[in-house]
Image (cartoon, grey):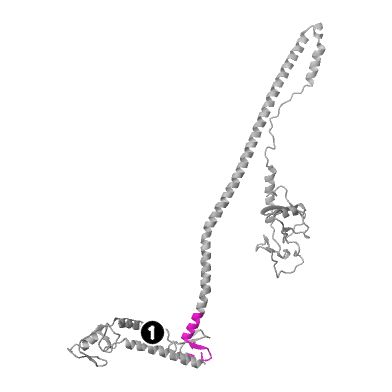
Amino acid sequence: MAETSLLEAGASAASTAAALENLQVEASCSVCLEYLKEPVIIECGHNFCKACITRWWEDLERDFPCPVCRKTSRYRSLRPNRQLGSMVEIAKQLQAVKRKIRDESLCPQHHEALSLFCYEDQEAVCLICAISHTHRAHTVVPLDDATQEYKEKLQKCLEPLEQKLQEITRCKSSEEKKPGELKRLVECRRQQILKEFEELHRRLDEEQQMLLSRLEEEEQDILQRLRENAAHLGDRRRDLAHLAAEVEGKCLQSGFEMLKDVKSTLEKCEKVKTMEVTSVSIELEKNFSNFPRQYFALRKILKQLIADVTLDPETAHPNLVLSEDRKSVKFVETRLRDLPDTPRRFTFYPCVLATEGFTSGRHYWEVEASVLVGRMLHHLQSGPQQIGSDRVGCLQESVSHLSPAEDFVQTLLLPLCLDCGSLWQDALVGKT
């Protein structure tokens, strides 16, 4: 079979070389044996270079013979053959290509044309190489057949490449549109932030106006009480000054006159001893703000006590997928397979534990979760869940399908505290 292929390859190469040689002969002048230059055709149909046939007939005045067939013509008739001139240029190009291919496609060992292809070595070989000991047991086919075969394979690869190119083009187009979309999202978020802070500023302004109004009312109230007390003290001062003058006058009187109404004067003096002198306090109300001052101090303390919680994959429920840094967890509908069967893994409740436990002291951390608010509040109101370990269950998601009337999904930041194994939502900082 291999010998038949070699013979067919040799025959094909010989046939191609013969056809090219015939084309070169037809494109050559029979006089100068070179490629035709400005080819002209005479009456007998043969073609020659215009300069060659002109020199051939230079000394003749009649009976102009053809240099090939010797047929004579009565007149010197030379008609340009432009189509043949184009074919001559093509023949020249083919000869140059043949020479280049011959120089590049020669076997470096035998200097023969590389007209065959070896499948095992994936290289072009010549006829002598194909029958040599190196390639004798290999599969060798004509180079044209191998070219056609691999051309078909490459064409089959072209379709998926074009599909992938279209996919990348679409993806690139999508990515190029994303900066504009990102700009729109950022602007939307910026407006949302501005709106929220504008609302916060409005509420703070209202709180400020309310507090200033309360302060002004408190000032007017104190001033009023000060004026009333000053007027009352003025009346008391006049009464006491009059009584003191009366007592001094009686001390200067004679015995009979002094004893007259002395009992009344003494009673007035006794009443003065029990008289209370009151002053109005100008101390302002202490609890003037709706924001407890201890709130900010407590937030600062809690920030310093935040625990670094890392989740334990060996305890995660099969429906929970942990992130690479094991700092977050996501619930999936389809259970994960091929998980190690460990006794610590949750199989009923969708829970996961931390890698390190807390056995004493107070610890604090914050959980950002997208939850069903109705069911979450139900769990919080029902008290802490027993998780059977000294380590904290960092996230517990409900898998029950509830009606929209009961639940709605919302992203919440839940501050959580642990005190000797008890889990609760902090009442002060747990507002979301």
In this rendering, the answer to whether 296 lies above or below 57 is above
> Can the viewer see residue 259?
yes
- Image point 67% across, 53% down: which residue? 412
The answer to whether 224 is drawn above or below residue 88 in the figure is above
Task: Identify residue for label 1.
Answer: 98
Pick the residue in front: 216 or 267: 216
In which quarter of the view is residue 228 placed? top right
Establish if 266 lies above or below 43.
Answer: above
Q: Is residue 288 left or right of residue 69?
A: right
User: What amino acid type should be assigned to the residue bearing mark 1?
Assistant: Lys
Q: Is residue 60 magenta?
A: no
Give the vertical position of 46 relative to 302 (above or below): below
Q: Where's residue 45, x and y in %?
A: 28, 88
Q: SS for tag 1? A: helix
Horizontal side, residue 207 vs residue 42: left or right: right
Q: Quadrant of residue 106?
A: bottom left
Q: Position of residue 249 (x, y in %)?
A: 75, 10
Q: Which residues are magenta?
A: 130-152
